[in-house]
């Protein structure tokens, strides 16, 4: 039996919005449609130049929203979380969705696992027109693999405790490409993550999404910078410290993927040489093959799929 609403923890969800007017309304509606009774929704528009503000105005006072001059995603989310009052926190990209049971499932999971600091779920991958491409089955949480193999289970639909957020601090303002991974590394130092084996969210891939849009050399170098900074922390468990070379090898492989994606093959090959130097075995692993394949064909594959579906719908 579900507890009376007054006994349930308040859940604060942040939506940072920047020029995603095409999808913003759907993201908001997916939160308003939740079956959980105690949600604080905060939407901050980060200086959009499309019709995002017009969409927000139509909601009136149904939730807290405001507009600010452009400050970037990290500063926007950190500000919104400081404004929030919830015991449990989450965020939703303005182009993603939560399924109706997402919040109640996350709260139930965290209440049943008092030693856990975060819950995460499986999610659907959507194309630009909201068609489901496939289900993403997230792996079971393994902190060692998150450090050494850069396997980052949490995606859309992740929720975490404010108490852990206060210990870990906010998102790092220096990163733009892998900011979530860097944060989950720090949050994971304060407790375990628990997987909910159910589809409770949707992640949209489109030309303007973070994982698909063109990157830069600065962003491509982030994986290595993140791992180097991580191992400088005194909080890193002693049993993980000998794994630094393995982690740096995988970080260079991920950096190579981003360099290849931006067409910088010289820098990509240089990153692969560094990966080999730190841990030759990583270069023949199945994960290395997947990273290389993703770098070379992922964007091409998505564009081809979108084109074929457009042609099919016109028939």
Image: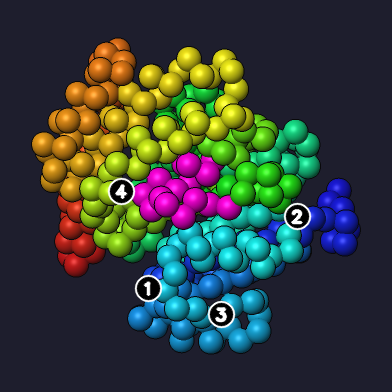
Give the foreground label among 3 and 4: 4
Give SS at disc 2.
Answer: loop
Q: CA distance from mark 3 to mark 1?
A: 14 Å
Which residue is pictured at 64% across the width and 77% down the height?
Answer: 64
Give SS at disc 1.
Answer: loop
Q: Mark 4, residues whose alpha carbon is within 10 Å: few (<14), some, or many (≥20)?
A: some
Q: CA distance from mark 4 to mark 2?
A: 32 Å
What label does residue 87 carry, if any? 2
Which residue is pictured at 57% across the width and 15% down the height?
Answer: 239
Q: Of label 4 and label 2, which has the lower sequence position?
A: 2
Q: Residue 77: x percent and y percent?
A: 54, 62
Colour scheme of the rendered structure: rainbow
Left or right of residue 172, residue 159 in this image? right
Q: Of label 3 and label 1, which has the lower sequence position?
A: 1
Q: Is residue 141 above or below residue 210?
A: above
Which residue is pictured at 43% across the width and 65% down the height?
Answer: 72
Q: CA distance from mark 1 to mark 2?
A: 29 Å
Q: Mark 1, residues whose alpha carbon is within 10 Å: few (<14), some, or many (≥20)?
A: some
Give SS at disc 4.
Answer: helix
Q: Residue 208: x percent and y percent?
A: 30, 62
Which residue is pictured at 13% across the width and 45% down the height?
Answer: 263
Q: CA distance from mark 3 to mark 4?
A: 29 Å
Q: Residue 272: x percent and y percent?
A: 21, 27
> Where are the magenta residues, as a range?
170-184
Give the foreground label among 3 and 1: 3
Residue under numbered circle 4: 219
The answer to the question of whether label 1 and label 2 lie on touching residues, with beta carbons closer than 8 A, is no
């Amino acid at each position: 039996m579900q507890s009376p609403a007054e006994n349930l923890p308040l859940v604060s969800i942040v939506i940072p919005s920047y020029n995603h007017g095409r999808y913003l309304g759907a993201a908001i509606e997916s939160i308003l449609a939740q079956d959980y009774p105690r949600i604080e929704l905060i939407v901050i528009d980060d200086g959009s130049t499309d019709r995002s503000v017009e969409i927000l105005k139509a909601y009136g006072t149904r939730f807290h929203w405001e507009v600010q001059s452009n400050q970037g995603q990290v500063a926007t989310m950190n500000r919104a979380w400081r404004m929030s009052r919830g015991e449990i926190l989450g965020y939703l990209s303005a182009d993603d969705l939560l399924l109706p049971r997402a919040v109640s499932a996350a709260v139930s999971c965290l209440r049943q696992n008092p030693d856990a600091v975060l819950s995460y779920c499986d999610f659907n991958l959507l194309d630009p027109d909201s068609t489901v491409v496939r289900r993403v089955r997230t792996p079971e949480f393994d902190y060692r693999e998150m450090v050494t193999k850069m396997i980052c289970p949490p995606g859309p639909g992740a929720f975490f405790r404010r108490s852990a957020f206060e210990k870990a601090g906010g998102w790092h303002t220096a990163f733009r490409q892998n900011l979530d991974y860097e944060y989950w590394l720090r949050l994971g130092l304060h407790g375990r993550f628990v997987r909910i084996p159910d589809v409770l969210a949707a992640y949209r891939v489109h030309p303007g999404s973070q994982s698909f849009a063109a990157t830069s050399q600065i962003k491509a170098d982030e994986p290595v910078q993140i791992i180097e900074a991580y191992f400088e922390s005194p909080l890193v468990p002693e049993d993980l410290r000998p794994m630094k070379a393995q982690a740096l090898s995988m970080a260079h492989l991920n950096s190579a993927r981003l360099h290849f994606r931006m067409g910088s093959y010289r820098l990509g090959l240089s990153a692969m040489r560094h990966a080999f130097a730190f841990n030759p075995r990583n270069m023949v692993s199945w994960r290395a093959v997947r990273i290389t394949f993703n770098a070379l064909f992922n964007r091409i594959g998505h564009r081809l799929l979108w084109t074929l579906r457009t042609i099919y719908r016109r028939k």
